[in-house]
Amino acid sequence: MFGRESFFQFIVIIVALIFPLQEARRILLSPVHNVLDYGAVGDDLHDDTEAILEAWKATCEGSFFASTMVIPPGKTFYVNPLTFKGPCKSSYINVEINGQIVAPKHPTQWRCYNNCETWIEFQGVNGISIHGKGTVDGRGQIWWDLQIKRPTAFKISDSSNVHLSGLHFLNNPRMHVVLDGLQSANVEDLHIHSPEKSPNTDGIHVAHCKYVSIAHSTIRTGDDCISIVDGASHVQVNNIMCGPGHGISIGSLGKNGAQDRVEYIHVNDVIFNRSTNGARIKTWQGGRGYAKHITFERISVIDTDNPIIVNQFYCDHEICSNQENAVKVSNVTYRHVVGTSKGKTAVTLDCSTTVPCEVFMEDIHIRSSKEGESVKSFCTSAHGWVKGTNVPQVSCLEQDRG
Ligand SMILES: *[C@@H]1O[C@H](CO)[C@@H](O)[C@H](O)[C@H]1NC(C)=O
Ligand SMILES: *[C@@H]1O[C@H](CO)[C@@H](O)[C@H](O)[C@H]1NC(C)=O
């Protein structure tokens, strides 16, 4: 009479009616799959990759309304590259990480050595919440000195309704967290830390994502704290501590003539502390597409090299040739940016001469972090307006008298 599915739906409705929300969640979030029950040891010696994958299989294939995989606290799980693949039978997947996850100690011990793309990936899982106080430590130190392909540490791809919170990411070989191809994602309370000199260790990298929120996180790293690239739209970033690091960047966009599109990005309530850039947009010459409807507001800068910078001549190697095409940068607003600049040029709008950019500014008050020095702005090929008094003044924008 009752199918298995409708039976569970029935149970869910009854539980939801009888119990308060928290309690209902707890009941419905069973069953729980602890990786220790699947043979993981957690002593930092055994390779726990296969055991954890077994626990994932059980979690993903359970036909309950929701199911949970637990990586318990007080243990260190040595893990080689692995992919947690969906789709799953359960509508909601919980991954509780309270233990430490560590990579093999030396790059040569990685199974994919010399060809590693990603260390830990969640792929194609809709309705997933990954949370806990655990640490993801890629032991990147040795990687940084080697001239080989370095892997991204933690990637969530091709999924919807994603929640990621609480975790610590430490010393990963390359990017710490990559969000790629997500629809509706909520990221908060992350603690990301690697040395100022570690190469390409972006904190959070967002590509091909719609409706993403990134909030309440501390990021200290060797590259961008957050980078937002092609296919990102409706991305909200707020309450971030960034620095050391290269700032919060839209881009780079348009590399090798690429047609990149980024729109509706809102960054607010961010502190840049001794970062090399603050609020940045960077595009390569020769690209196409656009970066538009972007707002940075309520930004504090402390001893930051380039607090505000739009750079359409981005080039990370020695020589880039001049090209006509450019990613079109428009409807970019900087509002309430205050603090101190380490560099002399606090505001840089270095826009394409063929495709000028459109920028609005309001309430910019940046002084030099060096006593007795003043700051200036630099601008080429930008138009738009400024409102109120701004320090430094930005001469290529019109004063708005409205
Ligand atoms: C900025 O960083 C310095 C040193 O890293 C630290 O002492 C200071 O508290 C930070 N400032 C803020 C506002 O967090
Ligand atoms: C400019 O961007 C903002 C969002 O940052 C948006 O609300 C506004 O509609 C855009 N203006 C135009 C003219 O598209």
Image: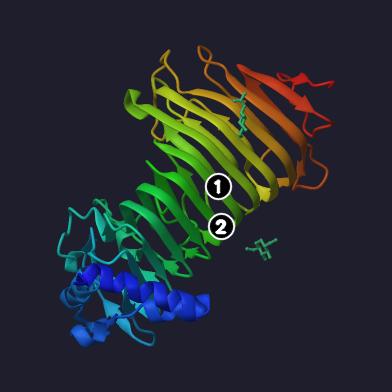
Q: Which mark is residue 290?
A: none
Q: Position of residue 259 (x, y in %)?
A: 36, 25
Vertical position of residue 316 compared to residue 325: above or below? below
Can residue 363 be seen here? The reply is: yes
Residue at the disc numbered 2: 215
**Residue at the image position 56 percent from the left and 38 percent from the top:** 280
The color scheme shown is rainbow
Q: Amino acid at mark 2?
A: Ala
Q: Amino acid at mark 1?
A: Gln
Marks 1/2: CA distance?
A: 8 Å
Residue 363 is left or right of residue 15, and the answer is: right
Residue 394 is left or right of residue 89, and the answer is: right
Toward the viewer: 173 or 267? 267
Q: Position of residue 50 (x, y in %)?
A: 15, 74
Q: Position of residue 31 (x, y in %)?
A: 30, 80
- In terms of sequence position, does the residue under pointer 1 or pointer 2 come before the other? 2
Taking the image as four quarters, which one is ligand 1 found in? bottom right
Vertical position of residue 35 compared to residue 216: above or below? below
Can residue 65 be seen here? The reply is: no
Quadrant occupied by the N terminus? bottom left
Q: Is mark 2 within 8 Å of ligand 1?
A: no
Q: Which mark is residue 236?
A: 1
User: In this figure, what is the number of numbered marks?
Assistant: 2
